[in-house]
Amino acid sequence: MPKETPASATRRDELLEIAAELFAEKGFKNTTVRDIADAAGILSGSLYHHFDSKESMVDEILQTFQTELFAAYDEVIASDADARTKIERAVRLSFEAIDQHRYEVAIFQNEADFLGGFERFGYLAERNAQSREVWMTLLNEGVKTGALRKDLNIELTYRFIRDTVWVAVRWYRPGGELSHTEVADQYLTILLDGIAHA
Amino acid sequence: MPKETPASATRRDELLEIAAELFAEKGFKNTTVRDIADAAGILSGSLYHHFDSKESMVDEILQTFQTELFAAYDEVIASDADARTKIERAVRLSFEAIDQHRYEVAIFQNEADFLGGFERFGYLAERNAQSREVWMTLLNEGVKTGALRKDLNIELTYRFIRDTVWVAVRWYRPGGELSHTEVADQYLTILLDGIAHA
DNA sequence: GTCTATATAACGATAGAC
DNA sequence: GTCTATCGTTATATAGAC
């Protein structure tokens, strides 16, 4: 039995989705509780029937998203595919997340540095370290098995990939010219083979 | 003769540098005028002897930086080097800017989307379009002359490069393990030749 | 679950003394 | 160029009626 009745859970989710869109587009600090309430068609005070604070809203948004995302990563690294395939899957997974959870990704990208400074959001740094572990393992395995070049600076390559895939949330729009799959194809081509003429 | 005496210009610059660091590290909205004044060792009201508003501070920071940056870009594209060399120089220029003006770069990266929505900061969008023109020209020339692969999606490649070079401001620190020149070397290697084993 | 009404704090900014 | 003192506004959040 869920903690909340389906009706209230639905309303909560609606409000969280509205808040997420505003946080993603205007920033957490630039979004007032009045903005959220206005967009939801209620008054600001009414929000506090559902949530403790504005902070707890962004907290719930980020936690829900990250739990889902890292479960997906775990599946990829647990598979018995070769290193290059795993890298490709992990990259595609990120673009899929941008497609399906762009508000959450944008909030994480834009606010993690600032929010991470507070105790309450300490899990953001932990998730960050966890993500680094996943990628460093994949890249080291790739170099060892010969799938990747031996002269790579792995640490830098990790940052390059991490930054490259997530920053796409700034311009990618679902329903646009390119699907998230096509964007992932193009990115993987550049990442793996470069832009220079062979 | 300069508009301001050397002494006041120096104090202005000091205050702007202090503000820039705070804006870059905590965000514009998260930084209060009291934060800036505290860091400068004065009271918040005293800031208004030097500046009209908090907004005008970030305005001056961004404008000064962008004027300098685009002058440097102009030099690169005006040179008679080949496409690949120009691309390499433009990339190196960006990492140099991150090294020497990281606060300004960070502010632009983090706040441009939000600030750009206000009339006063309309020049941010113009500069963005200007930057796009520079890169699209370079990339198209690169494909035409055979320096770059013909199957590249130029628009996507432009975004890839733009995002990749600037996002490094999130982790690069002057005086760290790698110099900005070395980071640029590594990035160019990945960008041009990819990470896959040849 | 939402509204009315309001408490409380923080913020940007101003006026005038020094 | 900075300080004292404070104004006016906006923000988050609360209490109780409906």
Image (cartoon, coloured by chain):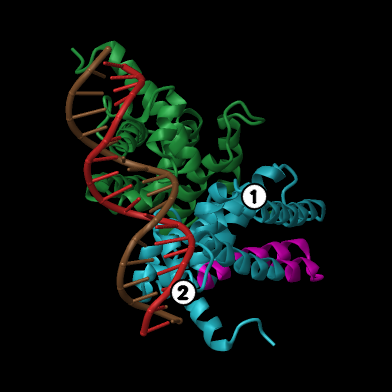
Chain colours: A green, B cyan, C red, D brown
Apparent side of residue B170 relative to residue B92 in the rendered image (left or right): left
Residue at 51% from the left image edge and 71% from the top image edge: B99
Q: Can residue B96 be found in the magenta stretch?
A: yes
Residue B119's label in the rendered image is 1
Apparent side of residue A36 relative to residue A130 in the rendered image (left or right): right
**Disc 2 on helix, strand or loop?**
helix
Residue at 30% from the left image edge and 44% from the top image edge: A127
Residue B15's label in the rendered image is 2
Residue B57's label in the rendered image is none
Q: Does residue B92 show up?
A: no
| Residue A133 place in picture, x, y as percent | 32, 48
Q: Does residue A116 show up?
A: yes
Q: Is disc 1 surrounded by few (<14), some (14 to 19) or many (20+) residues within 10 Å? A: few
Number of labels in the image equals 2
**Disc 1 on helix, strand or loop?**
helix
- What residue span does the magenta drawing correspond to? B73-101
Q: Could you say which is closer to the camera, residue B63 or residue B68?
A: B63
Q: Can residue A82 be found in the magenta stretch?
A: no
| Residue B18 place in picture, x, y as percent | 43, 71
Q: Could you say which is closer to the camera, residue C8 or residue A7?
A: C8
The amino acid type found where label 1 is placed reads Glu
| Residue A184 place in picture, x, y as percent | 56, 36
The amino acid type found where label 2 is placed reads Leu
Marked residue nearer the N-terminal end (1 or 2): 2
